[in-house]
Image (cartoon, helix red, strand yellow):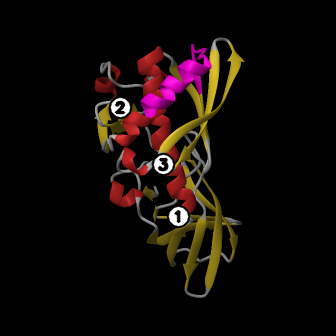
Amino acid sequence: MTEQLHMASFEGTYTRQFSATVEAVHPGIVELDRTAFYPFGGGQPADTGRLEWEGGTASVEDVRKRNRLRHMVAGDLPEVGTTVEGALNWERRYAHMKMHSSQHLVSAVVDQLHGARTVGNQLYADKARIDFQPLRLSPAQLSEVEAEANRYLARDLPVTITEGERSELEQDPLVRSNLALLPPSIKRLRVISIGNLDTCPCAGTHVRSTGEIGQIEFTKRDNKGSGKQRLTYALRDPTP
């Protein structure tokens, strides 16, 4: 099984380059013993970048995980056992980190102010959208959510990575997640916490603190039926 460097610590999350050994090769696919590349999932796009080794190079165009983690590549293919050097498209990866942490924060604020659950989300490098239910925010209420989210961002709250037993997390009223949606076979979960504001099981990549994120600016709200509302936002540099 491929070791995913971002899962255990922020040292792994902020790794831009790494060495690994090739474990399997298929047409257009490389499997490694360890990787800093994030696979598509949880509303977060896969990382892209490059793999290089003596005598060859390939671009990593997608990463997927279903039982095994596979790097979808274009270019040369290394032999099994080869040591390769991986390099992330860091600008893209870091944008996703900021978006993912901001999504947790926005979800927490909407839950706190309006009691609405996050029922879907999709992140991009330049924007994010979150679906809430039940929710019908007016323009004034959306401005209130934006202001409250930005107050939390400005406080530079620490983001932490821990692990917890599923049975304990299910009994914790502060955990913001419907664990019933996860397969019963998953007994231990990676947990992302933002200060005292939010605790949520998550396998995605995140920044070390909310001070890295910038400011949230909502750009769109759409009513999606069945009491759902979709909020779309972008991140801006902090106001001086």
Q: Where residue 85 sits in the image (x, y, percent)?
A: 50, 76
* Alpha carbon separation for disc pair 1 and 3: 12 Å
Separation of residues labelled 2 and 1 (CA atoms): 26 Å
Percent position of residue 89, x then y: 57, 65
Residue position for label 1: 90
Q: Who is closer to the viewer here, 214 or 140?
A: 140
Residue at which label 2 appears: 199
The amino acid at mark 1 is Trp
85 or 221: nearer the viewer:
221
At numbered mark 1, what does the secondary structure look like: helix, strand or loop?
helix
State the separation of the CA atoms marked 2 and 3: 17 Å
Give the extent of the magenta segment. Answer: 131-149
Q: Indicate left or right for 196 with 93 as reference.
A: left
Could you tell which of marks 1 and 3 lies nearer the N-terminus? 1
Query: Considering only order in the chain, which callout, 3 or 2, is on the residue closer to the N terminus?
Result: 3
- In the rendered structure, the answer to whether residue 54 lies left or right of residue 61 reads left
Tell me, yes or no, whether the highlighted magenta stretch contains residue 147: yes
Specify whether residue 179 is painted magenta: no
Mark before the other along the chain sequence, 2 or 1: 1
C-beta proximity under 8 Å, tags 2 and 3: no
Q: Is residue 182 visible?
A: no
For the question of whether residue 211 can be seen, the reply is: yes
Frontmost of labels 1 and 3 is 3
- Residue extending furthest toward the bottom: 55
Q: What residue is shown with label 3?
A: 98
> Which amino acid, mark 3?
Lys
Q: Quadrant of residue 200?
A: top left
